[in-house]
């Protein structure tokens, strides 16, 4: 009777061991399968990151403004980009028109000023200029102007001409700045395309034990900020 019971326990022990080993092998196969799946996902993610190149986004944006933002899948950046370009171009055109207006007025008034202030004893008197574009700036009776008023008006035309030329040059600089900033924007946006920004923004307060220089213990508060 004892021999039968021992044989029965031994058989159950071997069976349990066999089932346990089989279950362990199945778990090992499952773990290996899951591991290779995860590794495959990581490999695919790395490949996709390499294919998505910040350098390529920079080149696209440098060649065609706005194309880099489209490559970054940020098409909503296009209105901002072209609003900047449009504003710069508007001021270039406006300041160029005003500069040309005052430049022509100053050129004609310089001849008119020489005609008005010439000496009567000049052997070849200067004729009154037929081109008087300065009248587009101020339509007045210039024959009644004194010499001082003529000098002041000539100086005012020159100052306005120089001012609008400076504004025009600054507008060109602004256009170049908008172009460069958009290229930098596209490059930075592409660089941080895969940057993981966690939604877990929390502050945790943790106690901490401190040991002083005289081997005395103290309690401190540790602030941990997760982002």
Image (cartoon, grey):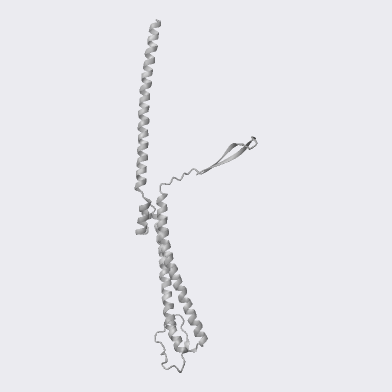
Picture coordinates of residue 82 (x, y %)? 40, 61
Judged from this view, the residue extending furthest toward the top is 1
The answer to whether residue 67 shows anywhere in this view is no
Which quadrant is the N terminus positioned in? top left
Picture coordinates of residue 29 (x, y %)? 35, 28
Vertical order, 213 against 187 (above or below): above
Q: Say which residue appears at 35% left-offset and 45% top-offset.
A: 48
Q: Please indicate whether residue 2 sits to the left or right of residue 144 in the image.
A: left
The answer to whether residue 19 shows anywhere in this view is yes
Vertical order, 29 against 64 (above or below): above
Q: Please indicate whether residue 205 sits to the left or right of residue 90 in the image.
A: right
Vertical order, 176 against 71 (above or below): below
Picture coordinates of residue 138 (x, y %)? 46, 81
Q: Say which residue appears at 37% left-offset and 40% top-offset.
A: 42
Judged from this view, the residue extending furthest toward the front is 213
Q: Say which residue appears at 36% left-offset and 37% top-offset.
A: 39
Picture coordinates of residue 50 (x, y %)? 35, 46
Q: Say which residue appears at 59% left-offset and 37% top-offset.
A: 207
């Amino acid at each position: 009777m004892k021999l039968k019971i021992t044989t029965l326990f031994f058989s159950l022990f071997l069976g349990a061991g066999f089932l346990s080993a089989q279950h362990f092998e199945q778990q090992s196969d499952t773990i290996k399968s899951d591991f290779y799946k995860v590794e495959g996902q990581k490999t695919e993610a790395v490949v996709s990151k390499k294919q998505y190149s910040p350098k390529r986004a920079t080149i696209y944006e440098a060649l065609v403004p706005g194309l880099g933002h489209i490559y970054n899948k940020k098409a909503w950046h296009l209105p901002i980009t072209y609003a900047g370009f449009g504003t710069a171009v508007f001021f270039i055109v406006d300041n160029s028109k005003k500069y040309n207006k005052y430049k022509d007025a100053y050129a004609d008034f310089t001849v008119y000023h020489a005609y008005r202030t010439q000496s009567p004893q000049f052997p070849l008197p200067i004729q009154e200029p037929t081109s008087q574009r300065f009248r587009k700036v101020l339509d007045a009776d210039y024959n009644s102007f004194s010499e001082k008023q003529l000098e002041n008006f000539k100086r005012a035309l020159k100052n306005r001409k120089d001012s609008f030329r400076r504004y025009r040059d600054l507008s060109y600089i602004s256009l170049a700045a908008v172009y460069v900033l958009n290229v930098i924007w596209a490059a930075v946006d592409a660089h941080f395309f895969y940057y993981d920004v966690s939604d877990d923004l929390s502050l945790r307060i943790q106690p901490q034990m401190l040991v002083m220089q005289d081997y005395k213990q103290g309690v401190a508060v540790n602030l941990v900020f997760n982002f």
